[in-house]
Image: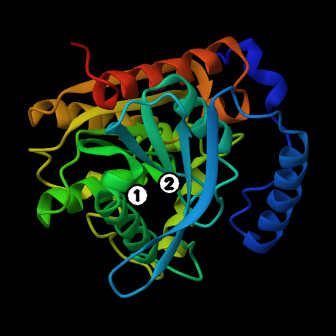
C-alpha cells in the first residue's frame, strides 16, 4: 500500500491529539481553531448558520450549530452531525467546513452537536447529549421546517461511534425513527485486536497506540465497553437504517469498519461502502481540497441528498 501523493504534504503537523497530554493538545487545537476562524471565507452564497442550544424537558442545554440554505423547501430533511476527536477533543469548529458543505450541496438542514467530552465527562455523557439534541430536533421540526421522516444521524471517527450508538439506542428504546446513518471512519470496537490496528500501531495522523489509550478516558474505567459506546459489540444489527460507511485504507480503524459493514449487510441493512485507497484517517478534514478529499465530501453530500433530501416527483 502507498499513500496518495496529494495527501503526503499534510502530515507532520502540530500535535493536537496526544492522548498523554489532553490539556496540551486542547490548547494547540484552540490556537489552530482561532487561526482557522480568522482565515475563513464567507459561507457559500445562500447558506447561513447560527449557534443555539438544544433543551430537554428538564431544561438541560446542549450547544448546537444549525446550518441551512435559504432556498430549502418547507419540510426539508435534516442531518444531526457529531464531530470526532477521540471522545476527548473537538468542538463545533472542527467540522464547520464539512457542515457548510453539506448545507450547500445537499437539500437538508444540518445540526452539529457540541457534546461533553471525556475524561471530565465519561460515557454516557456525550451520547446523552446527542440524544437530547436529536429529540430536540424532532420536537422543533415544525419550527425548523424539518420532515421528521427524513432525518439522518452522522458522525466522523469518535463521532461516528456516537452516531452508531445513538441509532442503536433509537432502535432499542423506541426512540425517533432514523432514515439513514452516515458513519465516517467510525470508532466502533474497544477491543483493538484487528490486523489494521496492529499494522498502524504508530502512524500519522492516527494510530493503534492512541486508539487503545482513548477508550479508558471515554469509559472512565477499564473493562469491556457497553454496546452503545462500542457499537461493534452489538450482537444484533437488524432493523438499522440505510448506512453510508466510509473507510480509509491506512487507518487502524479500517478492519473494524469493514467488518461492521459486512455485519450490517448480513443483517439485511442496505449499505453504501466507500473504501478510499491510499488514504489516512480523517483525510477529508485534513486535506479537503485534494482530489480524493473533494471526491469523498461530494459522495457524502450525494448520499445525504438521496436519502434525506427533497424527494423527486
Q: Which residue is mark 1?
A: 162
Where does the image place residue 64, in percent across and percent down from the top left? 54, 61
Q: Which mark is residue 10?
A: none
Q: Is residue 86 above or below residue 150?
A: below
Residue 89: x, y in percent?
65, 62
Classify residue 34 as left or right of residue 136: right
Secondary structure at badge 1 equals helix
Q: In the drawing, what numbered circle is on residue 158? A: 2
**Pick the front one: 174 or 147:** 147
Is 203 positioned to the left or the right of 52 in the image? right
Residue 285 relative to residue 300: left or right:
right
Decide: is 28 above or below 301: below
Question: Exactly how many numbered labels are in the figure?
Answer: 2
Q: Residue at x 31, y 39 (%)?
A: 75
| Dot 2: element | helix
Residue 250 appears in the figure = no
Whole-angstrom CA distance, mark 2 to mark 1, is 6 Å
Q: Quadrant of the N terminus?
A: top right
Closest to the observer: 164 or 53?
Answer: 53
Q: Is residue 39 above or below residue 57?
A: above
* Viewer-side residue, 148 vs 153: 148
Q: Are marks 2 and 1 in contact (CB under 8 Å)?
A: yes
Q: For residue 191, which quarter of the picture?
A: bottom left
Q: Is residue 120 left or right of residue 242?
A: right
- Give the position of the C terminus as an image quadrant: top left
Neighbour class for label 2 at 10 Å: few (<14), some, many (≥20)? many
Amino acid at each position: 500500500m502507498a499513500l496518495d501523493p496529494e495527501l503526503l504534504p499534510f502530515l507532520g503537523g502540530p500535535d493536537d491529539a496526544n492522548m498523554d497530554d489532553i490539556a496540551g493538545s486542547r490548547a494547540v487545537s484552540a490556537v489552530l481553531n482561532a487561526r482557522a476562524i480568522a482565515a475563513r471565507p464567507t459561507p457559500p452564497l445562500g447558506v447561513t448558520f447560527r449557534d443555539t442550544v438544544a433543551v430537554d424537558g428538564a431544561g438541560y442545554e446542549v450547544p448546537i450549530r444549525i446550518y441551512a440554505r435559504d432556498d430549502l423547501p418547507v419540510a426539508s430533511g435534516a442531518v444531526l452531525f457529531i464531530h470526532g476527536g477521540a471522545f476527548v477533543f473537538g468542538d463545533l469548529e472542527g467540522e464547520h467546513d464539512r457542515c457548510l458543505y453539506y448545507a450547500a450541496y445537499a437539500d437538508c438542514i444540518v445540526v452539529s452537536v457540541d457534546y461533553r467530552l471525556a475524561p471530565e465527562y465519561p460515557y454516557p455523557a456525550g451520547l446523552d447529549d446527542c440524544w437530547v439534541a436529536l429529540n430536540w430536533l424532532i420536537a422543533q421540526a415544525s419550527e425548523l421546517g424539518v420532515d421528521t421522516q427524513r432525518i439522518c444521524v452522522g458522525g466522523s471517527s469518535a463521532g461516528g461511534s456516537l452516531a452508531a450508538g445513538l441509532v442503536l439506542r433509537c432502535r432499542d428504546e423506541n426512540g425517533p425513527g432514523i432514515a439513514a446513518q452516515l458513519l465516517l471512519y467510525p470508532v466502533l470496537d474497544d477491543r483493538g485486536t484487528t490486523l489494521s490496528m496492529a499494522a498502524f500501531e504508530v502512524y500519522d495522523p492516527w494510530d493503534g497506540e492512541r486508539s487503545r489509550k482513548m477508550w479508558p478516558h471515554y469509559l472512565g474505567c477499564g473493562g469491556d465497553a457497553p454496546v452503545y459506546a462500542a457499537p461493534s459489540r452489538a450482537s444484533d444489527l437488524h432493523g438499522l437504517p440505510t448506512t453510508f460507511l466510509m473507510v480509509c485504507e491506512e487507518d487502524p480503524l479500517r478492519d473494524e469498519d469493514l467488518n461492521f459493514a459486512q455485519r450490517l449487510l448480513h443483517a439485511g441493512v442496505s449499505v453504501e461502502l466507500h473504501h478510499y485507497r491510499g488514504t489516512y484517517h480523517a483525510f477529508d478534514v485534513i486535506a479537503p481540497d485534494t482530489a480524493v478529499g473533494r471526491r469523498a465530501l461530494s459522495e457524502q453530500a450525494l448520499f445525504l441528498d438521496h436519502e434525506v433530501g427533497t424527494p423527486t416527483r
